[in-house]
Image (spheres, coloured by chain):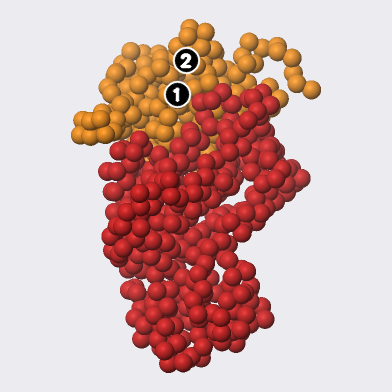
Chain colours: A orange, B red
Amino acid sequence: MPLEKIHPLDEFIRTDRLPHRFCPGCGVAVTMNIFLHAIKELTEEGKLDPKKLVVISGIGCTGRVSGYLKFDGAHTPHGRPIPFGMGVKLANPELKVVVISGDGDIVGIGGNHLIHAARRNMDITVLMVNNFIYAMTGGQVAPTTPQKVYTTTTPYGNPESPFNIIRLIAGIGANYLARWAITQPFQLKNSIKKAVLKEGFSFIEVISTCPERFGKRLGIGDPVELYNRLKSIAKIRKVSPFEAKYDWNEEITCGEFIDEDKPGFVRMYFEVIKEKLGERA
Amino acid sequence: MAEIRFDNSNIACAEAAIIAGLKFFAGYPITPTSRLFEYLTRELPKHGGVAVQCEDEIASINAIIGASWAGAKAMTTTSGPGFSLMLESIGFAVMTETPIVIIYVMRTGPSTGYATGTGQGDVMQARWGSHGPYEVVVYAPSSAQEAFDLTIKAFNVSELLRLPVIVLTDAVLAHTRERYVCRDRSEVEIIERKRPRIPPDKYKPFEPDPDDLVPPMAIYGEGYATFAESLVHDERGYYCPKSDVYEKLIWRLHEKVRLKRKYIVESASYYVDDAEILIVSYGSLSRVALAYVREMRRKGMKIGLFKPKSLWPLDEVSLKFAARKARKVIVVEMNNGQLYREVDRLLKDKKVFFRPLLKVDLPTVEEFEEVVRECL
């Protein structure tokens, strides 16, 4: 029996798929909620046609998001939502392409696609939910896991230093770059609204909570406690992206770091061809 | 109007793709495919299409799958090392029933092998390389003309069945310039994918039509909220890890191809009416085989050639017909016995021999004769 309309976001959700699989205290579900609020507002403001929105996810906990949403979309192989989205956008530039996926998917296995999409200023929005760990597979170390944290594959502590993705993307270039924690829902929502309307590459890192797979490794398995902990280290600052900190023990700097309007890849592709071919293009 | 052209199979494939309606191409440079890739980056924009270079082959194949969901006929090209990288997403295209075409130019393997050398070592990889039970169609041309014709056919089969289709050529064909007829769009059959005829609220992305078991394909941007799900899914495209749903899905993904087998298969037979010895050979090597068969005919030997143009599936009926009078069937390949296993399986009541020709260049007729002679 289909659920009655009981939630203002139901029009954007495949309600017959509910309940979703996210654990209590999971920041992915919070991100999904905030994303849909952003899309709803953009729709109501007449700035976005949800029929032209394509939401693509890869594999992992965040990878499940696109499947719950009532937009055109895909659940791609691990790490590949960005190139899939590139094909979608180039084949039909009228479509708005948003990739929602996790840190392992985007910057781990999919890292090569990420840096090249940023370099090309590819016209897609990437919402990367960072939960510091490979959660779906049981809590293995990720490229975002803080040093010395115990995970199932670093049983003596993580010897690696993590990616500070804001610095990575800033080093390559993008039209829009921001980082927010799920404890900052309004900033995140407004940021998503801005990013989705941007030409070129826009990237938002969402610092998330995973009490089950990450929190417990730190001794903070309680969702509320983990949420408050994140709240205390997620500091909003107006600084250069290269000064943004990524330190679980001290500060994860949040805010908007890049906001530019360079021509996106799609425009450049057609412009350079038109310059040479003229009417033949 | 059809035109006579003089070029290699890479260009014949590219021309055929444009005529078939190619609108999106993504690739990564690899020998011996680069001329095809370069040609399309130059020519496709003149035909309203987009051709781009990606960061690797994994990106290329995922980009063409995305483009296909956005409504474009989409294609990539690669060789062995690149196809190895694409394999995971071949399964993705199968599972999401995405029409795509891959021009796969075989070179000498394994590993980096010999980039400009030829080979036939990827016949199994082309068919079975991705994980899980699945079905794809693989064509193997032996000339620029066949490369042209089979590329158009590949697009038709992929659109008809919502399936990845592979055109397996080789380095010899990629480097051999020869005459071919470049047919006009009005002179060839062009098949477009089925689209939904029902409104979005009734549409299920993976609900097949009962006659051909192929679901009509809604494309992005038309309000159908369609979803390309790589997980085991039901007709709505919802993840559903249950045996009955899985069995039904996998059965259908195979069965839809089997139903169209007659349309899919392609082959040619030479001198088989009285052939007591039947050579089976495909790709550029089959041209050496044909020269050898003609030479032996002149010497009075009752010998024939069966040349499959579809390797997966094989044209079983024609193969059995060609072999009906044969005492011996000899499969010759530039590998250590790949299609041989399939031929041997189909011709259970025949003596089927295998002879390898492990060379980096196309063998001469003498070299061909040398390996076949021991089986006669």
Which amino acid type corresponds to the residue marked 1 in the rendered image? Lys
Residue ranking furthest to the top: A45
Location of residue A180 by image quarter: top left
x then y, percent, for residue B108:
37, 68
Q: CA distance from mark 1 to mark 2?
A: 9 Å
What residue sits right under mark 1 in the picture? A96
How many numbered callouts? 2
- Where residue A48 is drawn, which disc sits there? 2
Quick check: can you spot residue A20? no
Tag of residue B119: none
The residue at the point 79 percent across, 22 percent down is A1
Q: Dot 2: within a 10 Å radius of its alpha carbon, few (fewer than 14), some, or many (20 or more) residues?
A: some
Q: Quadrant of residue A4?
A: top right
Contact between marks 1 and 2 (CB within 8 A): the answer is: yes
The residue sitting at the right extreme is: A1
Residue B299, how many percent across, how many down?
43, 92
